[in-house]
Image: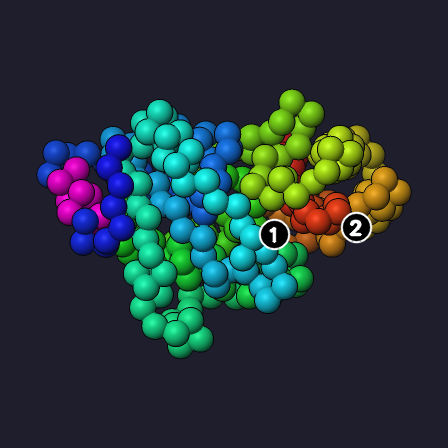
Amino acid sequence: MHKVQRVSSLRAAVVAARKEKKTVGFVPTMGNLHAGHIELVKVARQKTDFVVVSIYVNPTQFGADEDLGNYPSTPEEDARRLAEVGADLLFLPEQATMYPGELATQTVVYVPELGDMYCGVDRPEHFYGVTTVVSRLFNMVQPDVAVFGKKDYQQLTIIRRMVADLAYPVEVVGVDTVRSAEGLALSSRNGYLTEEQIEMAPMLRTVLQKTSDAILNSRSSFKKLEQSAITKLQAVGFEPQYFKICRQQDLLPAARDDEKLVILAAAVLGKARLIDNLEVERS
């Protein structure tokens, strides 16, 4: 696996791969890789011939009081794991490469409506930063396929909308969330949880599953199911930010006749903000 920092070196490697008739896959990350990230690389490896992984902690998707300065970094271990799983190129851009100027004056890519709800309510700058950095990375890497996890379902939906609206020639692939044996969605921020909280955290998944069962088997209104879920989470120590039953395609509130649903949830536990979701399909 080769490591590059310059866009010129990145593009030269991609051009060389394309001359060999190889398709290009891309997995953008912020590093501190866990089994969920590695699964994304494996999927990219299955679907394409030349896999690029980026590691860049993007400052524009962090709010003023968030953990940019303390975001975990494990570069040597990340590189080792990526080489083992078959990544071809690791792109490690510097700040000046990603944002050549003052952050406040940079061009921003913004997906309206989708970026304003759910996580966008409590983190208003977050999705501006995500779509802007992903757009830049797509222009730099020029992949055929880009792979993202479904753990951040809102982010995945927003990126798909951006790709459609801006006519990027990129296939966006979503990969099921990788979980611990207890059901906790893997995340770099799980390291903020205490041992006691790690035991409690899978309750978020449990409440999602029970809500899914109720959607399929009861006649309770979605509003009642959402409020019941919030009450259950509060009772065991979570601070829920939202718990919503939505349509998969646009994340708008689901109606009784919708068939493809997704339940989205975000809750604070101790110092960690946990997000999770569960797709529900009715016939």
Name the quadrant containing residue 163.
bottom left
Q: Quadrant of the C terminus?
A: top right
* Crowd tier of the residue under label 1, counting other residues whose Cα lies within 10 Å: few below 14, some 14–19, many 20 or above: many
Query: Which residue position is annotated with label 1?
Result: 251
Please state which of the two labelled residues, at mark 1 or mark 2, is closer to the viewer.
Answer: 2
* Crowd tier of the residue under label 2, counting other residues whose Cα lies within 10 Å: few below 14, some 14–19, many 20 or above: some
Looking at the image, which residue is at 34% across and 41% down? 53
Q: Is residue 46 left or right of residue 187?
A: left
Observer-nearest of 182 and 19: 182
Name the quadrant containing residue 15.
top left
Q: Is disc 1 in contact with disc 2, using a CB cutoff of under 8 Å?
A: no
Looking at the image, which residue is at 62% across and 40% down? 191
Q: Secondary structure at mark 1?
A: loop
> Residue 251: within the magenta?
no
Query: Which residue position is annotated with label 2?
Result: 239
Position of residue 238 measured from the top left corner of the image (x, y, whole percent): 80, 45
